[in-house]
């Protein structure tokens, strides 16, 4: 019988309150993922960088814990190769600690079956920005130059000739706890297992705009904009599940998985016209907005520290040290329309959860769009 390993990569938390919040949320998600993996007879291993200051985080889960001995900064590819070389599994399930925890047993079982294949192949939740994957014959990865982070793993394997596939896009495959906003959206959706539900329900972290934005998603007269790294397939999948009209701009896709020389249009607008003018125009253009700030505010591809990004996501400008991000956060907080700030997940898996959460407690006709016509069904 083939042995399938599961490696869960869990980064250390930062020192700020928002960073610790995200770290604690990921730990709760890992608790649920570990139990789900055990239900399909996969024994998980939790991997943490050597810089982690949380040595006993997962002791109560009775999982094997591997502390990477890589030198700082942490190199995902090298750590993964050391694990594969030392353990020599027949197949591999690979997760970031904020991902995969919404997957039901049947989908985890299908990932396990994929990893049991007879030739090397890879199945990704998102080929262009990997959060989790199933890999068969992972020993072949030992001869491949793997990336320092997990996001471009799909491109690295495809370039090395490994056959790669991607799972269908939905909340279960695309949602990832990457920012504090993700936790607030997860709380609103009532999704997740017992550990993560207990955690998010205990949070005393209000959001000034999320309730209003959820209202707008059910309002046929409203127009809500999506800005950032939105997949057209995600957009197409979410739009029929909400009542409002949608607009916006797809900006900066592949900013972490690949290299490009283009400057996102909205970023140029913010730079040339100024942040306050951007929000004035946005308020004239729509009734609410979900904004992936990273591609819009990155300077030459460089982002501020996660403490600044996460404080901005929570609309706490006084906790943001970077002047530009602080100004953007202040303007978002003062905007006359509800604005939801976050990272990639807020315009990926987060959109699916928002489309579910907006209908909770509402007995309304869900759809703005008519049901598609099937001529074969009509003839029958």
Image (cartoon, helix red, strand yellow):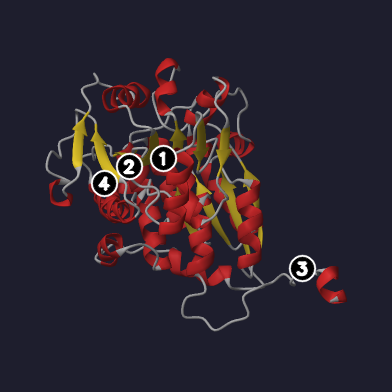
Give the residue furthest to the bottom.
363
Q: Earlier in the sequence, mark 4 or mark 1?
A: 4
Give the residue furthest to the front.
1
Q: SS of the residue at dot 2?
A: loop
Residue position marked by numbered label 3 in the rendering: 372
Q: In whole angstroms, how far apart are the C-alphas of marks 3 and 4?
A: 43 Å
Q: Residues within 10 Å of mark 2 (few under 14, many from 20)?
A: many
Residue position marked by numbered label 1 in the rendering: 325
* Circle 3/circle 4 CB separation < 8 Å: no
Q: In whole angstroms, how far apart are the C-alphas of marks 2 and 3?
A: 47 Å
Q: Earlier in the sequence, mark 1 or mark 2?
A: 2
Numbered disc in front, either 2 or 3: 3
Numbered disc in front, either 1 or 3: 3
| Towards the viewer: 257 or 341 | 257
Q: Quadrant of residue 5?
A: top left
> How many marks are shown on the rendered structure?
4
Residue position marked by numbered label 2 in the rendering: 320
* Circle 2/circle 3 CB separation < 8 Å: no
Q: Earlier in the sequence, mark 1 or mark 3?
A: 1
* Circle 1/circle 2 CB separation < 8 Å: yes
The residue under the point 45% across, 57% down is 106
Q: Residues within 10 Å of mark 3 (few under 14, many from 20)?
A: few
* Circle 4/circle 2 CB separation < 8 Å: no
Q: Quadrant of the C terminus?
A: bottom right
Q: Quadrant of the N terminus?
A: top left
Q: SS of the residue at dot 1?
A: helix
Residue position marked by numbered label 4 in the rendering: 23
Q: Position of residue 314 (x, y in %)?
A: 36, 53
């Amino acid at each position: 019988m083939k042995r399938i390993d599961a490696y869960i990569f869990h980064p250390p938390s930062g020192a700020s309150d928002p960073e610790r919040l995200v770290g604690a949320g990921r730990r709760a998600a890992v608790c649920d993922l570990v139990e789900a993996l055990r239900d399909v007879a996969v024994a998980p291993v939790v991997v943490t960088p050597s810089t982690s200051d949380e040595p006993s985080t997962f002791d109560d889960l009775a999982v094997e814990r591997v502390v990477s001995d890589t030198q700082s900064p942490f190199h995902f590819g090298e750590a993964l190769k050391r694990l594969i070389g030392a353990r020599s599994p027949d197949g591999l399930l690979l997760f970031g600690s904020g991902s995969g925890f919404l997957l039901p047993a049947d989908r985890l079982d299908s990932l396990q079956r994929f990893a049991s294949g007879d030739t090397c192949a890879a199945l990704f939740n998102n080929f262009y920005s990997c959060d989790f994957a199933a890999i068969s014959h992972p020993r072949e990865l030992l001869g491949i130059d793997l990336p320092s982070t997990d996001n471009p793993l799909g491109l690295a394997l495809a370039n090395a000739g490994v056959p790669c596939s991607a799972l269908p896009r939905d909340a279960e495959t695309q949602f990832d706890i990457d920012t504090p906003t993700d936790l607030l959206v997860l709380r609103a959706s009532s999704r997740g297992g017992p550990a993560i539900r207990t955690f998010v329900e205990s949070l005393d972290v209000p959001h000034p705009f999320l309730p209003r934005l959820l209202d707008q998603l059910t309002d046929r007269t409203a127009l809500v904009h999506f800005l950032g790294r939105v997949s057209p397939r995600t957009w197409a999948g979410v739009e029929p599940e909400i009542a409002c009209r949608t607009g916006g701009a797809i900006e900066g896709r592949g900013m972490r998985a690949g290299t490009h020389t283009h400057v996102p249009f909205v970023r140029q607008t913010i730079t040339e016209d100024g942040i306050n003018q951007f929000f004035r125009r946005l308020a004239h253009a729509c009734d609410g907005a979900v904004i992936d700030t990273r591609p819009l505010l990155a300077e030459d591809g460089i982002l501020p520290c996660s403490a600044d990004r996460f404080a901005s996501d929570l609309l706490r400008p006084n906790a943001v040290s970077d002047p530009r991000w602080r100004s953007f956060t202040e303007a978002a907080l003062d905007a006359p329309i509800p604005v939801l700030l976050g990272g990639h997940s807020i315009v990926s898996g987060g959109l699916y959860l928002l489309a579910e959460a907006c209908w909770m407690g509402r007995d309304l006709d869900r759809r703005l769009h008519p049901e598609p016509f099937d001529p074969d069904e009509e003839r029958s």
